[in-house]
Image (cartoon, rainbow, N blue to C red):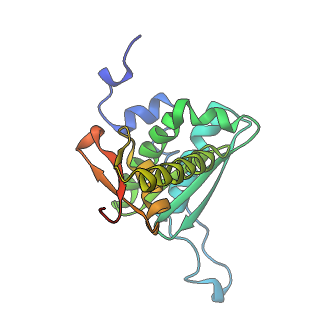
Amino acid sequence: MKNIMDKKTNLDDYLADLGISEAEDEAPTRKAPSRPEAIGKTAAPEEPLVIVERFLHGLVTRLDEGLDVRASEVEDGIEAEVVGERAARFAGREGRTLSAVETLAYAVLTKHTGRSDVRVRIDAGGFRRRHAETLAKLAERLAVQVAKSGEPHELQPMPPADRRIMHITLKDHPDVMTESVGEGSGRHLVIKPRHAS
């Protein structure tokens, strides 16, 4: 199988392969407000939410016309969900497609705004929500085991977002604490007793 990365050098090449031209990945321009009280209340053309929503809408509708995107601003960035009858398929195996699309959306956002402080999180068909619930339940089960045995438990390496879910789940647990150890793709979570016996 030919590796698409071999000949691609920048984001514009990837977008072109997806059928998204430079003009189409631009944020839409807004009409000038007609009422005096509306002046200053319109979104700027480079607003992060508009950029991400437009990019994702263009991408998902090219892949499947039955899909759409709902995006909103949250405290630390932008959350978007791919919706539609076959949205869950968009997540890909173990959420890898979602992670790749998040990376692309973040790159488009950074390219257009110059900002790198806006997080982009994308879900499809509730995949991330269900995955987070599964991780939280796992963290709670392992916390009980660690508290009972008094021995730390090391998990397999996992993505930062997954480690974060487990850290948050157990941050106020009275008997255990969590720590991320390792480097790069080998970084993993350790659940250990809060109070040494």
Look at the picture and state if 13 lies above or below 148: above
Q: Is residue 123 rendered to the left or right of residue 183?
A: right
Q: Is residue 160 visible?
A: yes
Look at the picture and state if 192 lies above or below 64: below
Of all residues, the one furthest to the left in this rendering is 183
Q: In terms of depth relative to the viewer, which is nearer, 111 or 45? A: 111
Number of labels in the image equals 0
Q: Is residue 184 rendered to the left or right of residue 151?
A: left
Of all residues, the one furthest to the right in this rendering is 85
Tell me the quarter of the picture where residue 175 sits: bottom left
Q: Residue at x 22, y 44 (%)?
A: 183
Residue 106 location (% of width, % of height): 42, 50
Q: Quadrant of the C terminus?
A: bottom left
Of all residues, the one furthest to the bottom in this rendering is 37
Q: Residue at x 59, y 42 (%)?
A: 58
Q: In terms of depth relative to the viewer, which is nearer, 123 or 132? A: 132
Residue 105 location (% of width, % of height): 46, 47
Q: Residue at x 34, y 49 (%)?
A: 152
Q: Residue at x 58, y 80 (%)?
A: 41
Q: Is residue 19 visible?
A: no
Residue 136 location (% of width, % of height): 54, 53
Residue 35 location (% of width, % of height): 68, 84
Q: Quadrant of the N terminus?
A: top left
Look at the picture and state if 121 lies above or below 4: below
Of all residues, the one furthest to the top in this rendering is 1
Q: In terms of depth relative to the viewer, which is nearer, 143 or 163? A: 143
